[in-house]
Image (cartoon, rainbow, N blue to C red):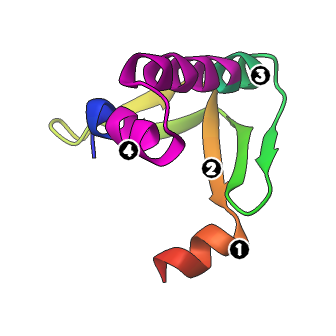
Amino acid sequence: MNKSELVSAIAEASGLTKADSEKALNATTEAIKNALAKGESIQLIGFGTFSISERSARTGRNPQTGKEIQIAAKKVAKFKPGKALDEAVN
């Protein structure tokens, strides 16, 4: 499912117009992005939790040359599904 299909599904389920559904989706993703950028986590009961994890610097290997390279430390976004979502998928 891509973004336009998701907007259509939201519009159908909520009774909103597609334009309003797209605004709601964009506002939601922007709010999640801003909270994660501040280092906060977002917990949606029954759906899951978005959080930030820190990866430490490490030594890797270039698969083409076999030469060792240094991989810098960075923050990564994580998602852990909630129980209801996990049960719905399985």
Circle 1: residue type: Lys
**Labels 1 and 4: the sequence-earlier one:** 4
Q: Which residue corresponds to mark 4?
A: 9
Circle 2: residue type: Phe
Front residue (pair 44, 53): 44
Q: Is residue 77 visible?
A: yes
Q: Residue 7, relative to residue 82: is it above or below?
A: above
Magenta range is 6-31
CA gap between label 1 and label 4 equals: 23 Å
| Labels 4, 2: front one | 4
Rendered residue at 70%/65% (across/down): 82
Q: Is residue 82 magenta?
A: no
Q: Residues within 10 Å of mark 2 (few under 14, many from 20)?
A: some
**SS at mark 2?**
strand
Q: Residue 21, relative to residue 90: is it above or below?
A: above
Q: Position of residue 77 (x, y in %)?
A: 62, 36
Q: Which residue corresponds to mark 1?
A: 83
CA gap between label 4 and label 3 equals: 25 Å
Given contact means CB atoms under 8 Å apart, are the residues at marks 3 and 1 in contact? no
Q: Residues within 10 Å of mark 3 (few under 14, many from 20)?
A: some
**Labels 4 and 3: the sequence-earlier one:** 4
Q: Which residue corresponds to mark 2?
A: 79
Given contact means CB atoms under 8 Å apart, are the residues at marks 2 and 1 in contact? no
